[in-house]
Image (cartoon, grey):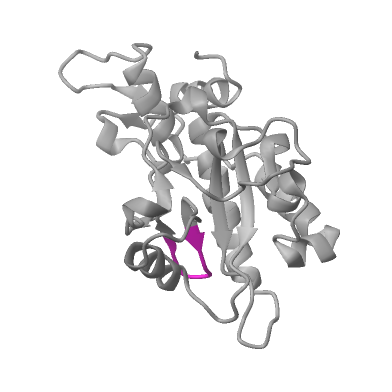
Amino acid sequence: MTINTKTAHASNYKAASRTAANIGFIVIHYTGNQGDTAKNNADYFARQAGLNASAHYFVDEREAWQSVPDKDVAWHVGARKYVHKACRNANSIGVEICMLDKAGRVRQGSIDNAAKLVRELMAKYRITSTHVLRHYDVTGKDCPAPMVADPKLWATFKQVITKPEKIEEDEDMYTVYKTIKDVPAWARECVNDLISKGYLKGDGDGQLDLEHYMLRGLVINWRAGLYQ
């Protein structure tokens, strides 16, 4: 999905150099505001200094905005006491959902958009659904409140992010993708990863010449974690 960026004020997060190996959890929050937008929140955290709070992403039903780079540490689950034994600011990504409309009702579109973002982050960092948590699961805080008050709402969210992403079928199984630009969106992250790890080299001049049936097999195996 398209991610807009407006980086938070430097005083609102900790600059770091995290790699994929340092990121093991995704924590879901809600902003607690009514009728707000992802951009409103990104603007606020960029404008205001000394908030002692932040999140990597803000999501509403239309957009997703990144406020803190993944490599840096956002202050979203800090606490004196923890419920969870391992999840902390240092090893997690915080996703804030603009979950309530102006009347205080749940905005399902924002939740759906957040699920899409979370699926992408899970794939990028090899995070399983068991490591996607509510703020409540980490510190006991009533956040995201609608998903604490209604466990079914949280259960449905977990089901959505757990379902295998569809691998699109083409009529011609022998379609040939000559370069990375020709590779369909559902397979591009996989191909880029395999190229970076040396599993795919092509002719060394940008020509991959991947047939569709071969690409499907690579993606299935990549999602199963067979290429490390």
Residue 5 lies within the magenta run = no
Q: Position of residue 11 (x, y in %)?
A: 36, 52
Measuring 56% from the left and 29% from the top, which residue is drawn there? 126
Measuring 77% from the left and 56% from the top, which residue is drawn there? 154
Q: Position of residue 221 (x, y in %)?
A: 56, 20
Q: Would residue 127 be visible to someone looking at this image?
A: yes
Q: Could you say which quadrant of the image residue 183 lies in?
A: top left
Q: Is residue 5 left or right of residue 24?
A: left
| In the depicted structure, whether residue 225 falls above or below residue 128 | above
Q: Could you say which quadrant of the image residue 127 lies in?
A: top right
Measuring 73% from the left and 36% from the top, which residue is drawn there? 130
Q: Position of residue 38 (x, y in %)?
A: 46, 68
Query: Which residue range is magenta in the image?
Result: 58-64
Q: Would residue 168 be visible to someone looking at this image?
A: no
| In the depicted structure, whether residue 41 falls above or below residue 205 | below
Q: Is residue 128 left or right of residue 196?
A: right
| In the depicted structure, whether residue 194 falls above or below residue 34 | above
Report the front residue among 86 and 179. 86
Residue ranking furthest to the left: 205
Report the front residue among 89 and 2. 89
Q: Position of residue 190 (x, y in %)?
A: 43, 28
